[in-house]
Amino acid sequence: MKILITGATGFLGYHLTRICVQKGHIVACLRRNNSHSLFDAATEHKIRWITVGETYWKQDLSLFEPEVLI
């Protein structure tokens, strides 16, 4: 399942994202350009980050086509 998660660098979002990745879902996460990831390298590698404010962030979000928004 393709899941879009907002707030992945916060407490709840971190744990939700980690669980979704562990279960094999395709995960994209929105973040601000000043946010810092707390994920280990293996999990970080599986997350597709979309940084709000970058030039093509809306296009990247649209192309991801999530089935679920958390």
Image (tube, rainbow, N blue to C red):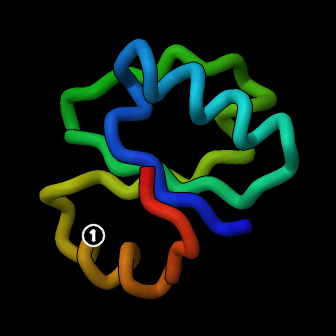
Three-letter code, disc 1: Trp
Quadrant holding the N terminus: bottom right
* In the displayed structure image, the side of residue 31 where residue 37 appears, left or right: right
Q: Is residue 18 above or below residue 51?
A: above
To which residue does mark 1 refer?
57
* Residue in the image at 30% along x and 52% along y: 51
* Residue in the image at 38% along x and 57% along y: 50
- Tally of marks: 1
Q: Position of residue 35 (x, y in %)?
A: 27, 27
Sort mark 1 into few (<14), some (14-19) or many (20+) by Cα contacts within 10 Å: some
* In the displayed structure image, the side of residue 53 where residue 5 appears, left or right: right
Q: Secondary structure at mark 1?
A: helix
Q: Position of residue 44 (x, y in %)?
A: 65, 34
* Residue in the image at 58% along x and 30% along y: 16
Q: Position of residue 8 (x, y in %)?
A: 43, 33
Q: Is residue 34 above or below residue 11?
A: below
